[in-house]
Amino acid sequence: MTSSPAHAVTGPAADTEVACTHLDTTARFFRALSDPTRLKLLEFILRAERTSADCVEHAGISQPRVSVHLSCLVDCGYVTARRDGKKLRYSVGDPRVVDLVVLARSLAADNASALDCCTRIPSADRA
């Protein structure tokens, strides 16, 4: 008798692969948050509406790089941009994003030692 992995499907569905198309979308959703600069900008925007110039000052990087990160956050639905004369103003696109960031910070804090020791996902200083 051979042993099967813990994640193996057993029973009638064992021969039928279940399509999980939502997994790619969900992974992309989290990938958008995996960049420390995007996360820093998102957390900054959560507190109040911000202009591009506010974001550049807060992030401490060039305006073109901030624009790329903000565009990603807008494209992924985390923030919205509205034109105000010549300026773009950024705000939270969905109030659930606030809950997501608060929960993520809490989970990360509770698991900080495990995350610090994880060698499979490099930290920014080990990348």
Image (spheres, grey):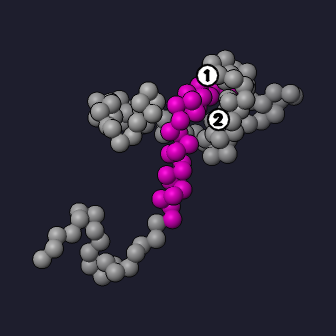
Left or right: where 122 falls relative to 73: left
**Residue 63 image offset from top left, x and y in percent:** 72, 25
Q: Is residue 19 visible?
A: yes
Residue at the location (46% across, 71% down)? 19
Tell me which amino acid carries mark 1. Answer: Ala
Left or right: where 101 falls relative to 113: right
Tell me which amino acid carries mark 2. Answer: His
SS of the residue at dot 2?
helix
Left or right: where 82 falls relative to 35: right
Classify residue 61 by image quadrant: top right
Could you say which is closer to the camera, residue 120 or residue 103?
120
Q: Tell me the tag on residue 106.
A: none
Q: Is residue 90 visible?
A: no
Position of residue 29 relative to residue 119, above or below, is: below
**Residue at the right extreme of this rendering:** 85
**Residue at the front extreme of this rendering:** 127
**Residue 109 image offset from top left, x and y in percent:** 35, 29
Could you say which is closer to the camera, residue 6 or residue 42?
6
Could you say which is closer to the camera, residue 46 or residue 121?
121
Could you say which is closer to the camera, residue 64 or residue 77?
64
Q: Which residue is mark 1?
A: 59
Q: Which residues are magenta?
A: 21-50
Q: Which residue is mark 2?
A: 69
Report, in whole angstroms, how far the alpha carbon at label 2 lies from the one at label 1: 11 Å
Q: Quadrant of the N terminus?
A: bottom left
Q: Earlier in the sequence, mark 2 or mark 1?
A: 1
